[in-house]
Every structure is written in C-alpha cells, then in structure tokens.
Image: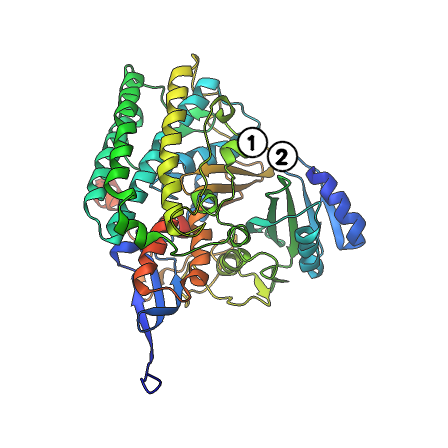
Amino acid sequence: MEALAIYQRLAEQFGDRILETVSKKPDPFCVVDPAAIVEVAQYLHDDPELAMDCLSNQSGVDYKDRIEVVYHLFSYSHRHGAVLKVKLPRENPAVRTVESVWKSANWMEREIFDLLGVTFDGHSDLRRILLPEDWVGYPLRKDFVEPLEYHGISTVRESPILRLDPKAK
Amino acid sequence: MNTLRTEEMTLNMGPQHPSTHGVLRFIVRADGEVMREAVPDVGYLHRSIEKIAEKVGYHGFMPYTDRVDYVCAMFTNQGWGMACEKLAGIEVPRRGEYCRVIAAEFNRIASHLLSVGTMAMDIGAMTPFTHAIREREMINDLIEELCGARLTFNYMRIGGVGFDLPPGWREKALAYLDHFDPILEEYNALISYNKIYIERLANVGVIAADDAVNYNLVGPNLRACGVKWDIRKDIPYSVYPDFEFEVPIGSGQWGTLGDAMDRYMVRIREMAESSKILRQALKQLPPGSVLAKVPRNFKPPAGECQIRVESARGDMGWYVVSDGTAFPWRVHVRTGSFAAMGITQKLSRGLMIADLVTLIASLDVIAPEIDR
C-alpha cells in the first residue's frame, strides 16, 4: 500500500486525531495527536492489511519552536512503510511510549530521552543510555551549550598551532 | 540439596573486556554460573556524531560517517551519500554505482571475516582468527590501492565515488576472489564443522522470528531466524538488481532455528554470495565517469528522507532533515548493533555466563555503531 493511502485510511479510522497529512516528497508523513499515538500504533500493528510489524526507526528532531518525535514503520509481509510524527512543546515534552507495541522502541526512546529530553510516559526503564547519568542538558537540542568542564576535565584547549605562530602572540 | 544456601552475585563485565569488541559493559546478576540477567551499559564510545553533522556540512560529514562503523565504513559512506542524493535528486553515474558495490562487497567480506574470526577467538579457538585476519589484510591492501585508507575509507562522495579503479586493480581483485573461494572451504574445514565449536554455539541465544522483527533485529541476525529479508534483494538500491545472488537464511540444522550457530553460518554463506556479486560486478563494469556533478556548496532543498542500506550488520537507516542551508538540520543513524544490543538483556536470562560471550560475538555487535 502506498504511504498516502495508509494515511488516508488512518484519517478515516481516527478522524481529527490525525492532525495533518503532508504529501511532500521524498518521504510523505502524517502528524498524529500525541494523546492518540499508542492507539494509532496498535491499529497499524494489528490491522492485517497494514501489519506494521517493525518500528524501523524512531528519532527526535528539535525545530526550535517544537520537538517532533518521528516513527518510521515498516511491514515485512506487505513491504510498505509509513512515517508518523507527533509534535510536542519544547517545555517538558512528553508522549506515551509505544514499547507495548514494538519492543525495539525501548532503546530508541531511551536515546531520544537522553539526547533531546523527551519523556516517554509508561516506559519501563527510562534512563540515560549514551551519556553519563549525571550529565546536565540535552545535546541534540539546538540551544545546547557544551559545559566547559566535566568533573574537572576541561572540554576546551588552546590550539597548539597558535602557540607556534609568532604573530598570534 | 534444599539446605544449600545460594546467593545472587552481581558481576561487572567490561568495559575493557576482550570479548566486548570495543568498549561495552554488562552488569551481570548471576546465581552460580547461570545468569538471572545481564544489563548492558553502553555509551562508552559516544562521539556525538549526529551533532557533528549539524556543524560540518554535507560534504564535510563524509569522513565522519566512517567512524559510525569503522569495521564496514563503505556502507556508512554509501548510506550518507544515498540520503543526500535522494534529498537533492542526484543520479549517480552507472560506473560510480558499480564502484560503490564493488567496494562495499569487499568491505562486507572483510567485516564478516573479522566477525567470524573474533567469534572463534572469543570461544577459545585462536588459530581461525589468524586465518581470517590474513585474508582480511589482503582486502585491506586492495581497498588501500583504491582509496588510500585501510579502515576509515572516505571513498564515496555525494554523487558517486572519489576515485575510479586504478589500472590493473580489476585483475588483482579477480585474482583475490579466485584465491578466496577455496580459502572459505579451508576455513569451514578448520572451524565451522568442528564438533566442539558446533556444540558451543548450537542452541545458544535462540531468537524466535517474531521476536527478531519486534526487536527490529536486522541483517544476518534477522536472516538467521529464518526471515528471508535482504534490502539488496527486497527494496533494491544502487545496481543490485543487475546481479544474481542468494540470500542465505538460518536452517536450524545444528540445533534450533535462530541460535548462535545459525548466525555464524549465515555470515559464512554471505561471504560466498558477496564473492559471486563481486565477480559479476567486476565483469560487467561499464565505462564512463564515476562522479556526478555536485556543487561544492551543496544545499539540498528543504525536506526530509530516510534511506536504508544493507550493511554488514544489516539494514542501516539514515534519516536526514534538510532546511535548505549548507548544513543538515538533523541526521539520525539507526544501526544494526543498536537493535541487537537491545535484545541481549532478554536473551541473557537463564544463560550461562560463558555463553554471554558467545551471544555477543554471534550478534556481531560493534561498539562504535551502538554509541555513534
């Protein structure tokens, strides 16, 4: 099934909880009401004609005025895919976890939590995955400023080339 | 026996353990030799590659993609190139695509050789590792002639590849393949059909096919569970439709379908298939240029796309968002090792501690690819 036909079907099934369908190439996507994401995900997974048995990718994007969580779904039996998005506010972004539908969401949601600070309600093990547990801030946010030191280890240094250049002194 | 007091131990394995292929750490809760659970702790190799992409621009990011997975850097190169080409609508010249496939398939053999070699070593057989590395060195020599590097290649460009095949390289490559095919038989005789080896691998870390799909396992790990799925065949990209090759899947003939032995054998058989593809590609190599005209100040139109490449560790997904400037707005790589590590906690329950090493080796996880 074509991606746009899938979104059409979702719109028929879920009405105004599918907020928007964007048919822009190369990858069209549809925006889902964050409160309905688990129901939509479960429907996509269970419906025999859609059968999205694989959450192939889940990631987050910071657009400065909002944070989006992007779900790339795929069906091995029908060989079609779909892209879902939820738009969240930048202050305390939170959405329900889809871990109950696809187990692979567990780690990918931990990564989004770690790097973008999105909270996934109902997640079984939501803690930092790549960064140390005591890290402050979310590096993939556009306004993240790297701290000058971490536990007394400096993150900046003077360029050794400047030291060699007599004009720089 | 009921009066025997047992106690649960918490053990630390890694991050500097020889079998963790890079820096991985497990916190193992064990009762005697049987694990209750092994909780993976990753992130020791996190280099914020996705953030770097937002700062260095499209062309400048190509060398960084090598570091996403330095054991099969050709595929990360190709993934990044393909994502940018899809965003900007660039068509790669046919010879460029052939060069990509040739470089990538050689890299797949090299990566699988490292995987099966280190796997034998982790399990306790030292000699097969030296055989595997010997063959891998020759591929490194070939690739070095191609692009000047042996590990982080930076061979591909947006729109094609950096260099055409040097004079005489094709003959050398074909000669290597003639040498390699019998070596694979020798390697099988040395280790693959060794009774002790099979007994260490069979029935260890069995993954059911629906679990594999649900946990998003990809590549050889997925195929070993009996799912016949290969991006090269099923969502063809580049010039793969030009070639005839098989997709090996797990058979369960040594134990249970989806066990460590199946994952090992799928890799062995894939090397033979890669060799087949390489012979066809080297034979059919078309003339022409290898690089499309791409502006130095590359600015793809605003938009987003996802592409999928069949890397040595399976379906690698690149998600790229462009805002129309010379710098990508967001880049995300979903890698095979990341998904494979996600399932280890579940698989470790009830496994022997010694089998954890087998499990990690058979999933072929590469730490930089998990952490990026």
Residue B324 vs residue A59, the one in the foreground? A59
Residue under the point 40% across and 41% down: B266
Residue under the point 52% across and 38% down: B308
Tag count in the figure? 2
Is residue A166 toward the left or the right of residue A96 in the image? left
The tag on residue B369 is none
Which quadrant does the N terminus of chain A fall into?
Answer: top right
Q: Is residue B352 above or below residue A158?
A: below
Image coords of residue B149 (percent x, y): 28, 32
The tag on residue A26 is 2
> Cβ–Cβ below 8 Å for labels 2 and 1?
yes
Q: Secondary structure at mark 2?
A: loop
Colouring method of the image: rainbow
Residue B124 vs residue B215, the one in the foreground? B124
Q: Chain of mark 2?
A: A
Q: Is residue B364 visible?
A: no
Q: Secondary structure at mark 1?
A: helix
Residue under the point 32% across and 44% down: B115
In the rendered image, the residue lying farthest to the bottom is B3
Image coords of residue B207 (percent x, y): 46, 54
Callout 1, which amino acid? Lys
The tag on residue B86 is 1
Callout 2, which amino acid? Pro
Q: Is residue B114 above or below residue B242?
A: below
Q: Are marks 2 and 1 on the same chain?
A: no
Task: Please rate how many residues cluster around mark 1, counting C-alpha atoms within 10 Å: few if below 14, some from 14 to 19, many from 20.
Answer: many
Image coords of residue B223 (percent x, y): 47, 43
Q: Tell me the CA gap for discs 2 and 1.
A: 7 Å
Q: Is residue A33 visible?
A: yes
